[in-house]
Image (cartoon, helix red, strand yellow):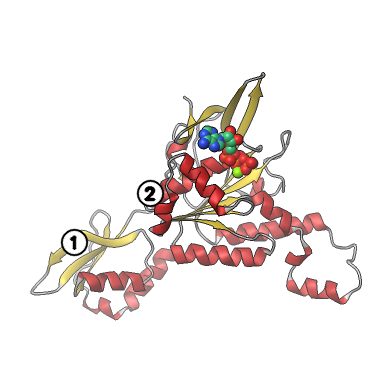
Amino acid sequence: MLVRASVLTYLLVNPLWNNIHNWGESGRTSNCRELGSREEIARFLRKGGLPLRFGINKKFLTPFNHNPIVAGIFMKKEQKYASFSLMKPILPKGLPRNDHILISGTPGSGKSILSLQFIYEGAQLGEKGIYVTLDSKREYILEQASQFGMDFGKLISEGKAEVLHLDPTDIYAFLDDLKNKASEMGAERIVLDSLSVLSVYCASYRNLPEDLMDFLQSTKYVPPIIDSSSMKKQMLYQVLSTLRELNCTTLLISELPKESNWFSRDTVSEFSSDGIILLEYHILGATGASRSLSVVKMRRSKYAEGVHEFTITDKGIKILQ
Ligand SMILES: Nc1ncnc2c1ncn2[C@@H]1O[C@H](COP(=O)(O)OP(=O)(O)OP(=O)(O)O)[C@@H](O)[C@H]1O
Ligand SMILES: [Mg+2]
């Protein structure tokens, strides 16, 4: 809504709009205007910082009067779901766009592979995405992706995807870096691998608000009134709400201990997230193992309930039907 309003404001105040000939509604086309050339149109769109879903509808690039061209600037109908093929048997429409989904699971259950597939598919569909790793080397993530035939190198060079290693020790710097990268790229998908690592640093005194930090430094000791667990939760809420401002469909990876009654170590994010996908890894006897996935919650969505077995093929995760 906000994007649409700001784009319309941009269009209306731009002097190029003075010679609007026609405001049309046709299919995905919302506005038509007279322009000089394709280059001018491209410049106009770039200057407006128009997001990916805006572009020039070539069908409307027709000669008009003598020289100028009438260009239709189309606005794709707001897609409500972000396509995620691997989840199709469970969530046929995909993930609710701009929602924040917790990907919870024990070590080795497949959280990172699933999330890489989400970014990769989006980038191929023209939805730019950022995979943020906090505790793995960038090269390891790229190597893991390439084992499943996901060529991130190409997508990265085309500006469609990015794998970023960010330092979680300073939460504010972390958020700034991510915000800058997301807006510079026009990202629509984000993976945070992992929220569990980030939440560890939320408890660090280094990340306390500046005025409180100054106060603490002015005293000779850390006063006992500071309850680190509630401070950590508050900080985490702040991080999660800042991430929401990015307006991206976001996967928050959450590492679970083997036996856990919760879906996150922080016990906060499972309530604030819009959805939870739980991945499990079961060892069966001496040589076998099985993997399964279930949707625990998905706000505003209908999904196939129950536990769904999956396997890891040479293309990545595949749900068995
Ligand atoms: N090339 C591959 N082919 C088949 N299976 C693989 C391949 N690479 C990794 N795996 C399997 O995937 C598992 C790791 O998956 P992934 O890294 O997504 O798990 P994770 O839940 O992110 O783990 P962690 O909590 O340690 O980050 C490995 O333990 C292995 O069983
Ligand atoms: Mg992982």
Q: Report the image quarter containing ligand 2.
A: top right
> Which residue is depicted at the point 56% across and 62% down?
178
Horizontal and vertical percent position of residue 222:
88, 66
In-front residue for pair 161/263 = 161
Horizontal and vertical percent position of residue 2:
45, 65
Mark 2 / mark 1, whichever is N-terminal: 1
Which amino acid type is marked by label 1? Phe
Horizontal and vertical percent position of residue 317:
49, 35
Q: Residue furthest bottom?
A: 15
Which amino acid type is marked by label 2? Gln
Q: Residue furthest top?
A: 285
In-front residue for pair 273/134 = 134
Query: Mark 1 vs ligand 1: CB under 8 Å?
Result: no
Is residue 181 visible in the rendered image? The answer is: yes
87 left or right of 227 in image = left
Q: 67 above or below 128? A: below
* Callout 2: SS: helix
Quadrant position of the N terminus in the picture:
bottom left
Is residue 297 visible in the rendered image? The answer is: no
Neighbourhood count class around disc 2 (C-alpha, 10 Å): few under 14, some 14–19, many 20 upward: few
* Callout 1: SS: strand
Q: 193 above or below 94? A: below
Quarter holding residue 207:
bottom right
Q: How many marks?
A: 2
The residue indicated by pointer 1 is 60
The residue indicated by pointer 2 is 124
Neighbourhood count class around disc 1 (C-alpha, 10 Å): few under 14, some 14–19, many 20 upward: some
> Which residue is depicted at the point 41% across and 51% down?
123
237 left or right of 218 in image = left
In-front residue for pair 55/28 = 55
